[in-house]
Image: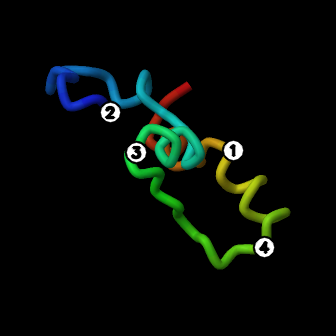
Amino acid sequence: MDQNTPRSANFCDYQVTVEAIEHKTKPVLTLWSALPEAVASEVKTTKGSLAQKLGCR
């Protein structure tokens, strides 16, 4: 979430991928750098399942 996001904002509206987070950081943050490229590209471009478990649609 952006730092200016109000506290009352719905978490479900702010889901992003790891890839999006990495590209937003300066200098670019690299998470899970030890993962093989094929695995990393799949994991980093897919939104997680926690939000759905919390009731997001």
Front label number (2 vs 4): 4
Residue at (49, 30) in percent of width and height? 56
- Mark 2 or 3: the one toward you: 3
Is 54 positioned to the left or the right of 33 in the image? left
State how many labels appear: 4
Residue bearing the label numbered 2: 1
Drawn side of residue 42 relative to residue 50, left or right:
right
Q: Which residue is mark 3?
A: 25
- CA–CA distance in space, label 2 to label 3: 13 Å
Give the residue type at disc 1. Thr
Mark 2 and mark 4 residues within 8 Å of each other at the beta carbon: no
Nearer the observer, disc 3 or disc 1?
3
Specify the label residue 45 is tagged with.
Answer: 1
Q: Could you tell me residue 46's position as x and y percent?
A: 68, 44
For label 1, the SS is loop
Q: CA distance from mark 1 to mark 4?
A: 14 Å
Question: Mark 1 or mark 2, which is nearer the start of the sequence?
Answer: 2
Q: Residue furthest bottom?
A: 34
- List the residue tagged with mark 4: 36
